[in-house]
Amino acid sequence: MSATPTYADWIAVDWGSSTARAWAIAADGTILAEAMRPIAPAVGRAMLTDLIGDWLGGTVPTPVLACGLCGGTDGAPYLSVPVKLAALCPQPAPAQSDRRLALALVPGLSQTQPPDLTAGEETRVAGLLARLPGFDGVVCLPGAQTRWLQISAEEIISFQTCMTGEIFGLLAGQASLRPVVDGTALDTAAFDAALADSLTDPRRLAQRLFAIRADAVLNGTVNPVSRARLSGALIGAELAATRPYWLGQDVVVAGTPVLTELYVRALSQQGVRARVIDGTRLALAGLARIRAAQIKAGGKP
């Protein structure tokens, strides 16, 4: 006997650079089902139906609200900062081949100086402020691309993106450092030392990176130490570049436990006592908030 199908009142989608996550939501806000799938950068919306198709049913198209990279090159136009969160109004996507869904896209944010873009982080900030109403300060969202966003009075004032996680992944997975940093363990003392060195003089970053390999070859340095030095050097260079975003600021770090632990540790070395928020469902919280505001304003659900 087949299982009873799960049909959603609406569907939330967080489309990242490497992973797509979706939630089937009931009319009362209950999460009926959840799906997650790795994706290739060039997939775009082609895989959306595969991800959520089992939740589509009924006589009218199911509303689907998405943030991140789901829009591709024909997504919602970017909004230039500063942007009030109330301005994050979903935009209808171009006609879908699957008529069972009605896709709307949350616009990302753009910045002219320095040039920058968000890819779902604006929605995570909306979710974070649903948990921390009235927050004024800086939100750090670590990931493959870490974004620092300045928040004041429900408005994203400015932001800065660093490719720290992506660079770490490339160096640890494909470069000559791979054999000496393989694994998951990190030596915290080595991390602290590398962080301090890189933050003090980020100009020497490129030299320090090869020194990690040389020290392992010449002195037999174990992988947890080498891996910690790589992480500390990169995060130290990031903190040097983003100093105005954390120095003297109220900082909240939201992400996966592994990354948030490293960033909170790094900030604490500089005297910043950052708060930690579980970032697992921030995008969902943000999408739910944006949808509720849209319905309240009389827009299509």
Image: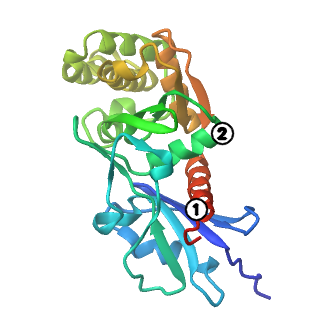
- Disc 2 residue type? Arg
Could you tell me which residue is drawn at 45 percent across and 10 percent down?
Answer: 270
Colour convention of the picture: rainbow
Vertical position of residue 248 compared to residue 152: above or below: above
Residue 144 on image: x %, y %: 39, 42
Residue depth check, mark 1 versus mark 2: number of the one nearer the observer: 1
Vertical position of residue 228 compared to residue 18: above or below: above
The one of 152 and 23 positioned closer to us in this rendering: 152
**Residue carrying label 2:** 131
Could you tell me which residue is drawn at 60 percent across and 46 percent down?
Answer: 280
Could you tell me which residue is drawn at 38 percent across and 31 percent down?
Answer: 181
The one of 139 and 254 positioned closer to us in this rendering: 139
Residue extending furthest toward the right: 1
Tell whether 166 sits left or right of 175: right
Residue 202 on image: x %, y %: 25, 16
The one of 94 and 163 positioned closer to us in this rendering: 94
Q: In this orientation, does residue 102 appear?
A: yes
Could you tell me which residue is drawn at 35 percent across and 68 percent down?
Answer: 43
Could you tell me which secondary element the residue under label 2 belongs to?
helix
- Disc 1 residue type? Ala
Marks 1 and 2, the one that precedes in the sequence: 2
Residue extending furthest toward the front: 298
Vertical position of residue 6 compared to residue 22: above or below: below
**Residue carrying label 1:** 297
Looking at the figure, which quarter contains the N terminus? bottom right
Q: CA distance from mark 1 to mark 2?
A: 22 Å
Q: In this orientation, does residue 279 appear?
A: no
Q: How many other residues sit within 10 Å of disc 1, few (<14), some (14-19) or many (≥20)?
A: few
Looking at the figure, which quarter contains the C terminus? bottom right
Residue 263 on image: x %, y %: 48, 25
Q: How many other residues sit within 10 Å of disc 2, few (<14), some (14-19) or many (≥20)?
A: some
